[in-house]
Amino acid sequence: MFAYYLRLAWLSIRQSYGLSLLMVLAIGLGIGAAMTTVTVNYLMSANPIPTKSEQLFYVQLDNWDPHEPANDNGDPPDQLTYRDSTALWAANKAFRQVVQAQMTAVLEPEGKDSLPFQVSGRANSADFFAMFEVPFLFGGSWDRSADESMQQVVVLSQSLNDRLFGGRDSVGEKVKLAGDYYQVVGVIANWQPRPRFYDITTGAFNEVEEVFVPFSLISQQKISRNGNTNCWKPSGEGYEAFLNSECVWTQFWVELRNEQEKQDYLTFLNAYVSEQKKLGRFERPVNNRLSDVMQWMENQQVVAQDASLMMVMSLMFLLVCLLNTIGLLLAKFLSKAPQIGLRQALGASRQDLFTQYLTEAGCIGIAGGLLGLVFAWLGLQGVQALYGDEMKGLAELDLAMVGLAMLLALVSSLLAGLYPTWRACTVQPSQQLKSQ
Amino acid sequence: MFELGPIFRALLRQKVGAILIALQIALTLSIMVNAIFMMQQRSSQMARPSGLDEANLFYLSNTVFGQNYNHEAALADDLRLIRGIPGVVNATQINAIPLSGGGWSMGLQHKAGEGENSIGVAVYMVDDHGINTLGLELIAGENFQLTDIEWRPATSVSWPARAIVSQAMAESLYPGAYQSALGKTVYINQNEAVQISGIVKTLQAPWNGWDGVERSMLVPFQMETRNSRYIIRTEPGRRDELMPIIEKALAESDKNRIIRNVTSLEDTREDSYRSHNALNKILLLVIVILTLITAFGIVGLAMFSINRRRRQIGTRRALGATQLQVMRYFMLENFLISTLGVVIGAIAAVGLNIWLVSKFELAPLEPQLLVVGVLALYLVGQLAVFYPARKAAAISPATATRSV
């Protein structure tokens, strides 16, 4: 029976191909626009580390100006001071903890012909790799003692290892970084969490760094940091004074495996801040925060406003396309009134008719959905071309999105088909037959 | 008056089709008006001048990796080298590039001390060639003298005694009388005195989304840093030719550093407003497609309702209605439907705007735009219904006498 309805639908679509084409086009455009923006939003808000996003916490403390909050909404500053984050790291109270900052250095390759070049880097303590599940190609992380004794060790990215060592196992080799020799202890395999959640402050969609070195080297001024720095009061003359200042420029993550550990850590943080208050610091009310990965991404508005704005607009656009389809389907089905009357007189039940016309609506929906996929693909290409690197990796259709697009197309066309179908089924056969 | 009564009664018998069209028009109007408004806002942001001679400026990064490096001597050599190249108007070391998104901000306050109200300002560190290099217009006071320029060691936190501010910054400090800022002493870093020795007309901060983007200041500093930037102004039309020449000359003059990121200011502007530009193009496309879809929807439904009423139209023609009157009937019918649509749409547009303002950082809608949107949609409706109406007018009176 269903095959018969499909044939009828095909005949009817062919019979008024202009109208049908218009409907398919409208649904296609609506679905295409909606899927383009939904995909971008979906990828922007994706969970970058689903296995433990609820066990990783970003730490915030409020050391800000007693006269003025760091953020208008009362949130503590986005980063920590050097003295606080290193003190928390030294306390070692969490299951794992990492103190980190962004850095940059010039790398001088061996060999006379090779020119020195700039690499992006991260200064972090050892737990970084285990906490964020960084995959290693060769070797592994340095350990906590390397941080404590300020060893000059380095972990390279795969691409940098390819460039410097032709992709071979370089563990044990030396590289000259910022004028000093560093021993390679590990090479990480291709790794690009999107969003790059571990450092949202310097850019949630930036590339993962090329070199990683122990954070403690920063205190020796061996490496130059280049992330964001915010100060609310003068820091005083000299590097030592800067490290001890109230300027925030370091980030601190902890891994806490359960609620109990989380509560214990909050208690520890509160105790730490009360201790600091006795030293005349932390003059604002206690405002310690532990945010897990998804909370932190939301707090930092990782999903760009423009992206959600576009999604709102595109969903409204889809609504217009659907209204359009309802109107056109209505016109089409009602023009079939004589035929419907005839079929009813010949014994078709209302349910038969209902199924038949809904089948037709569904066919149009699926055709629209397929066209919509093409438009979505074009749309994402367009977005990528318009935004450039900013959207790299954020404008790709995956299977889940393709499925969603088809589902959305089918459901919305069936919904759009409901009213016109119902109207078509309520045609009075006697009236229609009379006028023939 | 015309046939408004009959049209209205006929519409009531075909409510759903009319309501669907009206809703489509309403949604189209509310999206259209808000989208155009967003485009206008972004375009006006993009149109703000930076105050710089953008067409003839470019900059580069100078990253030093050699040890025991004499930064002060190297900077003097570099600047002498660049300024001596034919076609170069001027050059200076600078800490941040306008429009680039990365820079340095401080607060200026009228009284020294903690807790005093301070006004945020972008800081540009330049030497006495700064104003000429950037192409700024000095409207009061005077440029830095060679003797004003201080050498700033990497870890220094002190500030020089003089500064030049933008007119907008002067206005923020002395509302209504920016000229009076000249010669006044303000405090930077809470308690260091700085005298305002000049005012430039326009100089934007590096962050185009900052609400204080017009507030900036120049301070006479040359910096000791392993990562410095030189900004260079060329004679008109010679920028692209000189960019590689200067890059090569600098790279070859000193092997202890890397020259990179040689970028023109025009590219920086494009990069800076890339998302603005992209969103505007997308919104424009949305508006065009939306209008087309609505228009085709109107055409489709009008054709349908005319086909249903062929006999009725034929009868009217047979009873003496002219072609023009038949056309007028359908145009007026569309006008009535559009009216319902734009009334709902205008309310929805304002509602949508209120919601957008509360949810995103947007300004409230300007009412003129709503009027323009309403007129535009009336026009779209009339244009869309014109072809079906002409078809209707062409129905022969003889149709009345034929049975279907």
Image: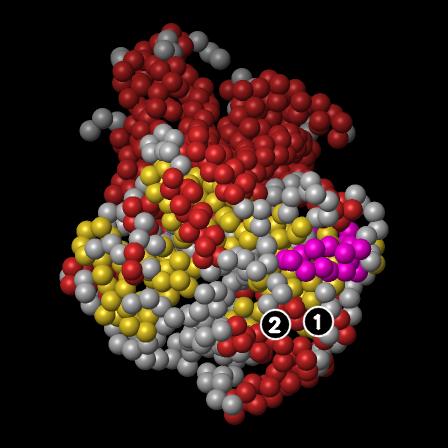
Towards the viewer: B59 or A418: B59
Q: Which residues are magenta?
A: A173-196
Residue drawn at x 25%, y 73% is B110
The answer, for residue B89, to whether it is visible in the render is yes
Residue at position x 29%, y 46% in the image: B132
Percent across and percent down for residue B81 are 43, 43
Say which chain tag 1 marks: A
Q: Is residue A4 above or below residue A155?
A: above
- Quadrant (top left, top right, bottom left, bottom right) of the C terminus of chain A: top right
Q: Give the residue drawn at x 37%, y 45%.
A: B91
Query: Toward the viewer: A99 or B153?
Result: B153
Badge 1 marks a residue whose secondary structure is loop
Q: Quadrant of residue A302?
A: bottom right
Secondary element at tag 2? helix
The x, y position of residue A3, in whole percent, is 76, 27
Which residue in the structure is indicated by mark 1?
A150
Q: Which mark is residue A219?
A: 2
- Residue at point 65%, 58% (across, down): A179
- Regarding residue A102, the answer to whether it shows in the image is no
